[in-house]
Amino acid sequence: MFRMILFTQWKWSRLAVLLGTLAAFLLPILSVQHAGSREVTPWEARMLLTSIQSWSVLYPTLATAIALTLALMAWSADHRGRHVYALSLPVPRWHYALQRFGAGAVLLIPPAIALLIGALVAAALATIPHGLQTYPVALAARFALAMAVAYAVFFAISAGTTRTAGYVLSIVGGIIVVQILTAAAGLDVHLIPFIGDRLLLWPGPLEIFSGRWMLIDV
Amino acid sequence: MSHAIDIRDLQYRAGKTFEIRDLALRVPTGSLYGFLGPNGSGKTTTVRLMLGLLRPLSGSITVLGAQVPRDIPRILARTGYVPEQPHLYQSLTIDEALRFHSVFYPTWDWGWANELFGHFGLERDRRLSQLSKGEMGKLEMLLALAQRPELLVLDEPTDGLDPVVRRDVLGALLEYVSQQNATVFISSHLVHELERICDWVGVMDRGRLVAELPMQSFKNGIKRLRVANPPALPGDTPFVVLAREVNNGTETWTVRGWQPPMSQYFDGVGASLREVIDLDLEEGFVELLRTFRVPRE
């Protein structure tokens, strides 16, 4: 049963998986194209780190994009059929949802492995200045974890009805409106930064997306 | 008599305009039960309630001896369902759809699926999104039958199909029923179709069950009577008078529950019965709905 569910999900999202895998492989290699020789000045080493850092924003972006696409594709066919087919299959609903979740999670593996291979290749090809280190495994692990977290969040939202999505958007919109109104009223309320910190800083659930996504670092 | 489907005191509401009230419905095991009703009468909602796709406000639903919604996976494993609208994954090919569907049903019969496949003339590599309405209808029926179900729930299975496809689909259904003694619950507004194949009939209108009886009783029980010298008021009749129309000194009565010995009633009231006219199921169905609606309009 799981194999067939995995097959359908692969069929629906294979383009996204293949493009995501290719991007994940190329991203670390492209990020080290400006790495110079072993003997560099501290200034040049700092410039290299700045260059690497400018690429680092692309890792969580790519992880989010892949996760979002796979989560949406996991349910899109069922949404189109108003879930009648899935609900008429002789499996408990939680079981079906779990299998769909698991199938999507399996499809996250190729981009994660591609990023690991790409990072290892980049680390091997690049000439790293003295005093700097490469972290291909840590970067790949962070990327895989970010994809898993984003996938879980988007899967839960996309599994719901249009009404659920409406509630989520309403909450987000409401927060933005409150922030604008309080700012207009001259009140010292920083709702969005407050929520952002709670989500993105330790021990927030999305902490994995912040921090340093560096293939080369001190 | 055991019942494959037993619904009692069912209440359901969708929005402010539609509700199912006090629905009680019993489908005898092994019967071909035709579920008739005009569009919007609540047929599809009833089907979805009995398969656990919707949750009722109250009441009980028992299907194949198991409770809905508690035992719904067990019920669905023994039930073939053809919904009103095609519900399969459109991006799959026919072959992929078959393989996907088969893994969920322990009783799936590949031998018979392949036989039906040839009989229906479907092509394995065609995408579902490319199928005509007739081909999709055949595929839906194939999937339902190859499960070897004890109960088939068919919601407007031949609606919009051409006569040739309709004959193929109903032929396969009847062949299966004759082999397996399965129960069939078939919802439709195509009265003539049900008249040919069903042995029980339930009539739904505005969320309520108007009538439920053997097809033979339904067909034979509704008559048109030509009556001369009719009484001004029919009084205590042994049958139900659905409608009266005056025609040149005689009256035409549409009645329900008619049996030949009841002609004595007319002697008793000084009238004479000139003619008893058989109505077909469609005419009976229309008359039944008309009389059901009169007191409420």
Image (tube, coloured by chain):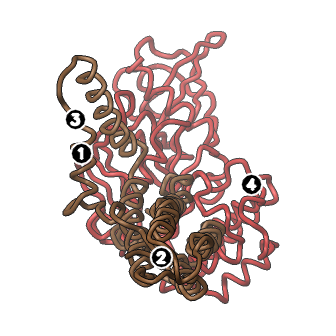
Tell me which chain appears red: B
Q: With respect to residue A61, does A17 lie above or below?
A: below
Q: Nearer the viewer, mark 4 or mark 3?
A: 3
Mark number, residue A195: 1
Q: Which chain letter goes with mark 4?
A: B
Mark number, residue A190: 3
Residue A124 seen by the camera: yes
The answer to whether the residue labelled 2 contacts the one labelled 3, judged by CB atoms less than 8 Å apart, is no
Tell me how far mark 2 sits from mark 3, CA to CA.
40 Å
Q: Nearer the viewer, mark 2 or mark 3?
A: 3
Please tell me which residue lies in front, A120 or B21. A120
| Three-letter code for the amino acid on which mark 2 is drawn | Ala
Provide residue A180's location: percent of width, then percent of height. Answer: 31, 25
On the same chain, marks 4 and 3? The answer is no
Tell me how far mark 4 sits from mark 1, CA to CA.
51 Å
The answer to whether the residue labelled 4 contacts the one labelled 1, judged by CB atoms less than 8 Å apart, is no
Please tell me which residue lies in front, A26 or B139. A26
Which hue is chain A drawn in? brown
Tell me how far mark 1 sits from mark 3, CA to CA.
9 Å
